[in-house]
Image: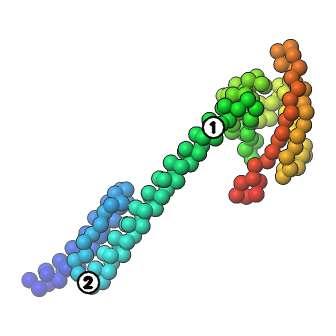
Amino acid sequence: WMGLYLAKRITRPVQMLANAAREIGAGHLDQRIEPQSDDEFGALTEAFNTMAGELAASRLKVEQTTVALEQRRRYVETILERITTGVISINASGAVTTINSAAARLLGIPRSVIGQPAVGVFERPDLEPFAALLRPGASSRHAAREREVTIAREGHEAHLTVVATPLEGDTGI
């Protein structure tokens, strides 16, 4: 009986920790274990409970940040859609990432160009002044550039001021 009792005192806490670890791995971060003793297993159980609490707090913080980022994204998108100035953004790879309604209407570009290479989007003859801004060596990567351009749209000339501004990110560009 003594051997079984000692084996149970060792295997039961280990089994409880293993089961709780599986629950945590499955995403149930509210999983806690009641310490059965004040020995090493009790300390291990307390450490496990502390870790589980920290994981739950981290998950909550990530969820709150995700909600805040989504709200911020919707806010910026709403502003871009409501302004009458055309806005087009192009990522470092040269693909169109944003085109608001005003830009699509002014330039006669469908909104479906998002994700396409900007060079291809601006290859039409009437959009040549925009394509010139995208060519290598056309300007400094760090300075905003402003240029007056004239494009022919539906039999009329449109005089536009184009401002190309690099957006700085974590890498500095």
**Residue indicated by mark 2:** 38
Residue at (21, 73) in percent of width and height = 12
Q: Quadrant of residue 150?
A: top right
Residue at (90, 30) in percent of width and height = 149
Residue 31 in percent (x, y) is at: 31, 63
Image side of residue 88 versus residue 21, left or right: right
The quadrant of the picture occupied by the C terminus is bottom right
Q: In which quarter of the image is residue 136?
A: top right
Label 1: few (<14), some (14–19) or many (≥20) C-alpha neighbours in 10 Å = few
Residue type, numbered disc 2: Asp
Image side of residue 72 versus residue 83, left or right: left
Residue at (48, 58) in percent of width and height = 61
Can residue 115 be seen here? The reply is no
In what element is the residue under mark 1? helix
Residue 163 in percent (x, y) is at: 84, 39
Picture layout, residue 6 above or below residue 112: below
Can residue 10 be seen here? The reply is yes
Image side of residue 104 versus residue 18, left or right: right
Q: Nearer the viewer, residue 137 or 105?
A: 105
**Residue indicated by mark 1:** 77
Q: Which of 110 and 103 is in front in this view?
A: 103
Q: Sequence-wise, which precedes: disc 1 or disc 2?
A: 2
Residue at (50, 48) in percent of width and height = 67
Q: Judge depth for marks 1 and 2 and give the one in front.
A: 1
Residue type, numbered disc 1: Glu
